[in-house]
Amino acid sequence: MVDPALAHRAETAGLNASAPPQQGEVEGWLIRLSPGKAKRSRCINALAAGQLPLDDLLARCQSSFDKAGLPLIVRLTPFSQPADLDAQLAAKGWPAFDAADVMVLADLQAFASPPALPQGQVLLAVENSRYAEIVGALRGSSARAIAAHAERMAASSVPYQGFVLQSAASQLLACGQLAQEGQITGIYDVFTPEEYRGKGHGQTLCTALLAQAQSQGAREAYLQVGSDNPVAQRLYARLGFEFAYRYHYRSPHGVVD
C-alpha cells in the first residue's frame, strides 16, 4: 500500500509543476486559466472548503473562466474540499470525464546504475520551447496550445527538463520531461510516435529519465496516466510505480476536450 504522505507529496508537487502564469485564488480554490491543452492547467483545484455557499463560489469562478474564454472545469481528487464536492457536482448533473491515475515510486535507488541505451540510440536534452513544439506536433496540438505549453514551462517555479530518445538515423523514438522539486521528480508528457510503439522505447526513455533524476538528487517520483491506458500503466508498473490515487474532472458544460 502506498504511503498516504507520499501520495500527498505527489499531489502537491504536481500542482506546483503544472502552475500556469494565469492563476488566481478564490476562497482557497486555485483557479488556472491557461489556454493550453493540459486540463490540469485550465481548471479549478479545490484546496479549501471556503466560507461561501457552493453556488456562490462556483458563480465567482465561472466569471473568471468566462473572461478567459474557457469552459469551467473542476478537478476532483481525494484531497478536494469540501470533502463531498464531487458528490455535490454530480448531483447538479455535471458529468465526470478524463479520469487519470497518479502513480508513485518510493525509491529511485534502483536507477543509480541504469543499463546502457540500446546500440545506436541516444538521449538528447532539448530546451523547453522546442520540446513543446515536438510533443505538440506529435499530439496534433494547435499553435495556441503549443505556445501556452511553452509559456507555462518557462514561467514554472519547478524547472522542466525535456529529452528525446533518437535512433542512429536521428529518428524520434520517444520523448518525455522531468519536473524535479527537491527530492521528488515528476515525469510528464511521455510520448512515443505511433510507428515506434510496442518496441520498448517508452521503457528505455523512462528508465533514462529516472536515472537522470536520481543523479540530480531525486529520491521519489510520480506521474499521471490515463485510467483507460492499461498499456502505459503496465509499463510504469514494470519500472516500480504503484497506484496512489485517481482523479477526474467535472464541468457544467459536459465533457470538455
Image (tube, grey):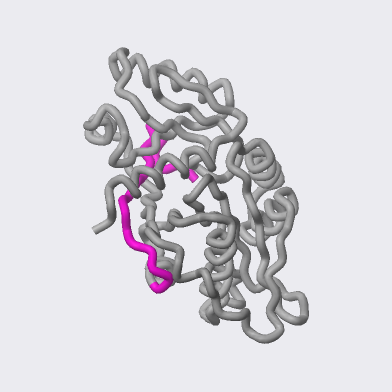
Picture coordinates of residue 64, whole percent (x, y): 51, 20
Location of residue 182 with respect to 157 vertically, above or below: below
- Residue 86, quarter of picture: top left
Location of residue 203 with respect to 17 vertically, above or below: below
Q: Which residue ends up furthest to the bottom in the rendered image?
A: 119
Q: Nearer the viewer, residue 256 or 26?
A: 26
Horizontal side of 142 relative to 216 (left or right) equals right
Location of residue 89 with respect to 27 vertically, above or below: below
Q: Is residue 22 in the magenta section?
A: no
Judge whether residue 144 can be spotted in this image: no
Span highlighted in magenta in the image:
238-257
Judge whether residue 28 can be spotted in this image: yes
Q: Is residue 254 in the magenta section?
A: yes
Residue at horizontal 36 percent and vertical 54 percent from the top: 101
Picture coordinates of residue 13, whole percent (x, y): 46, 43
Q: Nearer the viewer, residue 35 or 191?
A: 191
Picture coordinates of residue 189, whole percent (x, y): 56, 56
